Image (cartoon, grey):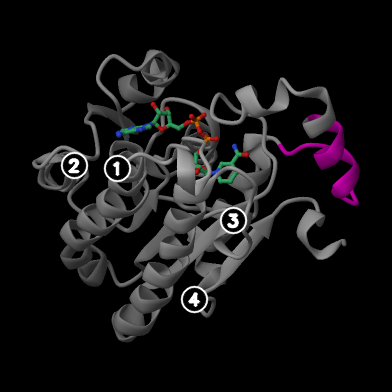
Amino acid sequence: MTSTQQLDGARAVVTGAAGGIGAAIARAFLDCGAKVLVADLPGAAGFDSYTADVGRGAARPIEADVTDDDAPDRIVEAAADVFGGIDILVNNAGVALPGTIEETTDALWRRVMSVNVDAMFRLTRAAVPYLKRSGRGRIINLGSIMSDMGGPGLFAYGASKHAVAGMTKSLAVDLGRYGVTANYLQPGAVVTALSAPFFEDADFRRYWEEKAPVGRLGAPEDCAAAALFLASAEAQFISGVGFNVDGGAIVKF
Ligand SMILES: NC(=O)c1ccc[n+]([C@@H]2O[C@H](COP(=O)([O-])OP(=O)(O)OC[C@H]3O[C@@H](n4cnc5c(N)ncnc54)[C@H](O)[C@@H]3O)[C@@H](O)[C@H]2O)c1
C-alpha cells in the first residue's frame, strides 16, 4: 500500500497480525516505514509472510495468546527490547463465537470477553507508559458495527464490541493530555477467516453486499487504510471516535 501518511520509524504493536485485518494493518504500517511487532497465537501460519521484513529488521514476530496472564508484559517488553518503545498499539485480535443469549454458555461468554475485552484492557494498560513517552501515541482498537448495533445470534460478541467502544472513549479522555489518541475501527462485513463461516450462507452474503451502498463486501485492506490514517500525524486531533469501515451499510435502512 502506498500512502501520503508516512509512519517512518514509528514503532507499532499489532495483535492478531498473522491473518485477516491484523495482517493487512501490519502490512500497511510496514509499507509506510513503521517497525511492527506482530503478535499472534503460537504456530500461526501467517507469521511466514513477514520473513523478508524480519530480515531487514522492520518486523518481529511474537507468539502469544493475548489472554495469557503474562502476554501483556511479554509483548510490551519485546517491543521495548527490539524497537526501543511503542508509538502505536493496535488491539486487533478477536473472536466471534455465535449464540443467542439462551445458547451462550458461561464458557462461551468468558472466552469472547477474555479475547475481545480483557486482553485489550490488559495489553493497553501495559503499553500506556510507553505510549505516554512516545509523544505521538496512538491506540487503535478493533470494534465493529456491532459496537453500535445488535446483531442476530451474536450476543456475547455484541456485548464485547460495545465494551470496546466504552473502553476506547475512556482512554481518549484520560490519555489526550499525553498526546495519545484512542480510536476504534468499526468494520462491517469484511471477508476474513473470522467471517467466512457466516458468508457461506449465500443469503447472508447477498444481504451485506446489497446493504452496503458501495455494493460489495469489505476487504482487510479497507480496514488497514483507516488504521493507517488514524495512526498518522495528520490524525492527531481525532480521538474517541468509532470509525465505520462498512461501505456505508449501517447508515442505510
Ligand atoms: N471480519 C469482519 O467482518 C469483522 C467485522 C467487524 C469486526 N471485526 C474485528 O476485526 C478483528 C480482526 O478480525 P478478522 O476478521 O481479521 O479475524 P481473523 O480470524 O481473520 O483474524 C484474527 C487474528 O487474531 C488471532 N487471534 C485470535 N485469538 C487470539 C488470541 N487469543 N491471541 C492472539 N491472537 C489471536 C487469530 O489467530 C487471527 O490471526 C476482530 O477483533 C474482529 O472482531 C471483524
Q: Position of residue 157 (x, y in %)?
A: 48, 48
Which residue in the protein does label 1 denote?
106
Above or below, comparing residue 41 to residue 236 in the picture: above
Residue at (51, 41) in percent of width and height: 25
Give, as a single range, the part of the protein colored magenta: 205-218
Which residue in the protein does label 2 denote?
75
Residue at (61, 31) in percent of width and height: 195
Question: Hey, what amino acid is under mark 1?
Answer: Asp
Which residue in the protein does label 4 denote?
239
Q: Is residue 191 left or right of residue 97?
A: right
Question: Hey, what amino acid is under mark 2?
Answer: Ile
For label 1, count other residues whose C-alpha is less than 10 Å away and answer few (under 14), some (14-19) or many (20+): few
Choose top left, top right, bottom left or bottom right for residue 200: top right
57 magenta-colored: no
Q: Is residue 58 left or right of residue 234?
A: left
Question: Hey, what amino acid is under mark 4?
Answer: Ser
Q: How far apart are the two marked residues, 2 and 3, measured between alpha carbons?
A: 28 Å
Question: Hey, what amino acid is under mark 3?
Answer: Met
Q: Position of residue 3 (x, y in %)?
A: 65, 48
SS under mark 4: loop
Q: Position of residue 178 (x, y in %)?
A: 29, 80
For label 4, count other residues whose C-alpha is less than 10 Å away and answer few (under 14), some (14-19) or many (20+): many
- Disc 3, ligand 1: is the CB inside 8 Å? yes
Residue at (52, 54) in percent of width and height: 158
N-terminal-most mark, 2 or 3: 2
Choose top left, top right, bottom left or bottom right for residue 181: bottom left
Q: Nearer the viewer, residue 195 or 58?
A: 195
N-terminal-most mark, 3 or 4: 3
